[in-house]
Amino acid sequence: MAHEIGHYVLGTNTHANHGLMRASIDAREFADLGARTFGLDEAAQAHLAVVAARGALPADPSVGNPFSYLTH
């Protein structure tokens, strides 16, 4: 779920090579309490900083939300 929220917050549908925003996550990682694999990579962190500085998150939460049809 955090990955999908990341798409919304970052305003992008792209994927990273590692970290939270990669395209696939091994289910075993969820059981590993020491896993450090769910952070944002440097590119996503930089992009989030730009988005936050611009105040670019949409006021309407359904904008850019691929799951908005579930709320109607």
Image: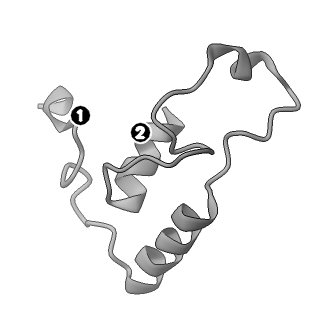
- Using a 10 Å C-alpha cutoff, classify the residue at mark 2 as few (fewer than 14 neighbours), some (14 to 19) or many (20 or more): some
Spatial distance from mark 2 to mark 1, Cα to Cα? 10 Å
- Residue at mark 2: 4
Residue 26 figure quarter = top right
* 59 to 22, vertically: above or below: below
C-beta proximity under 8 Å, tags 2 and 1? yes
Question: Looking at the image, which residue is at 41% across and 75% down?
Answer: 51
Number of marks in picture:
2
Judged left or right of residue 24, residue 19 is: right
Q: Is residue 27 left or right of residue 57?
A: right
Q: Secondary structure at mark 1?
A: loop
Residue 47 on image: x %, y %: 47, 71
Q: Position of residue 29 (x, y in %)?
A: 72, 22
Q: Amino acid at mark 2?
A: Glu
The dot on residue 67 is: 1
Give me the residue at 46% from left, 49% from top. Answer: 6
Amino acid found under the numbered disc labelled 1: Phe
Residue 32 % position (x, y): 82, 22
